[in-house]
Image: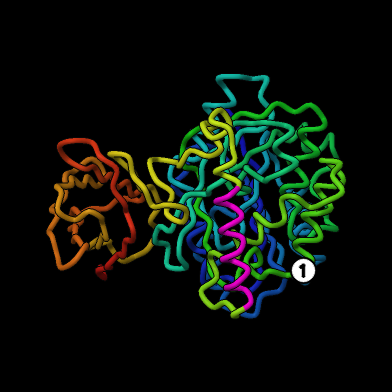
Amino acid sequence: MTEYAIVIPNLNQSHFLPWALESLKYQTEPFNLALMDGGSKDNFKEVVRQYSDIIAYLKSDPDGGQAAAIREGKRKVDGDVVAWLNADDYYFPGTLRNVSAAFEEDPGVDVVYGDAVHVTPEGSFLSYFPPIQTYDARMLTKRCFICQPACFVRRSVYENIGGIDPSLRYTMDWDLWCRLSLSGARFKYIQKPLAAVRYYDSTKTLSTDRLRYREIYRIERKYGHRLLPLSWPGFYRFDLSFKKKRTWFEGLLLDVLDIMKKAKRLGLSRRFYQNQMLKPLYGFDRFETSLVYGLCTIHFPWYAKEQLERLYLRICPSDRRYRVVVNDMTAMCEKLEKDWFCVRFPSSNGSHVKISIEQQGEKLIWRLKDFVFDLESL
């Protein structure tokens, strides 16, 4: 049986940490957890007491940064496969079981990765991790199509390349994937949702720190051998699209980058356009076109004490019939004013929420423009 070495770095994010730890309790495969805290000043000790039964190694002192903490943590715990979770990210129930099955089906595989979802700080679904695709060594140097918490690496190949680079602050995951690729490691993509990534303005990824883009350029030069940072506009556009508070200049840049992206897609050949990289996961892409071709499915893990009570959907056109299924149960769908529909959740949501929305009758194109969740305290 596959055993996992999992590291969680943390610094003053103990309000998010219980979700990461709770998600590990929903795993059936054996794991050893190293919790590496950089000296938090919040309620870290209280959280640790609640989950001490699943923590194999604990350290809470100032450290050399996130990458250094991850590197040290992986040395402190045993496991055939290594991975790390940021304190504000978490797994789907059964993630490690799905990954183990992939490793066992093909013992020659070194890296297994899958799908991920973006969620709000409260844990509600935002979107799917957009650039996911099957493994392509050349494309990996152009775009990071592997979501870090949804990626698992055999310890042997991880150690053979020297592990994570502690000098990097933003791109240590992408750098690790590129070095694994260059070493000849075999990658396998499984089309299953494995992890949830919180997205909000104060996250490190969305900080638009210049160092982040310098590190991105470094990867393109070092592994892609390109003089110009061709991927930089795409990363910057994606970061800006999630920011709620933009300066007027950032808003202008986002408009320009959107036009550039549309022009690029219009110029793509039919064959390239049909590549899996550009296909929306599970039926739709919320931040590109919001188009749905008949059926779309929303997946996200749910570990809150509150229960999901209602889902409000904004669907166009609203004069057609739609069927909503929540965790394999048909849910009541009530038409409200304008383009909004209200869906009542079944009494038990479960820890893996799956919502399928299908247009009834003739399969036409429609838009899922927005969705909002209501919670009920237990």
The part of the chain drawn in magenta is 249-263
Quadrant of the frame with the C terminus: bottom left
Main SS, magenta residues: helix
Counting from the top left corner in percent of width and height, residue 281 is at 45, 41
Amino acid on which disc 1 is placed: Arg
Indicate the quadrant where residue 257 lies: bottom right
Counting from the top left corner in percent of width and height, residue 293 is at 32, 39
Residue 250 is inside the magenta segment: yes
Q: Is residue 231 above or below residue 102?
A: below
Between residue 125 and residue 306, name the one nearer to us. 125
Residue 106 is inside the magenta segment: no
Counting from the top left corner in percent of width and height, residue 320 is at 15, 49
The residue sitting at 74% across, 54% down in the picture is: 171
**For mark 1, what is the residue?**
210
The residue sitting at 63% across, 68% down in the picture is: 253
The residue sitting at 19% across, 56% down in the picture is: 318
Quadrant of the frame with the N terminus: top right
Task: Determine whether, in the image, residue 11 is placed left or right of residue 342.
Answer: right
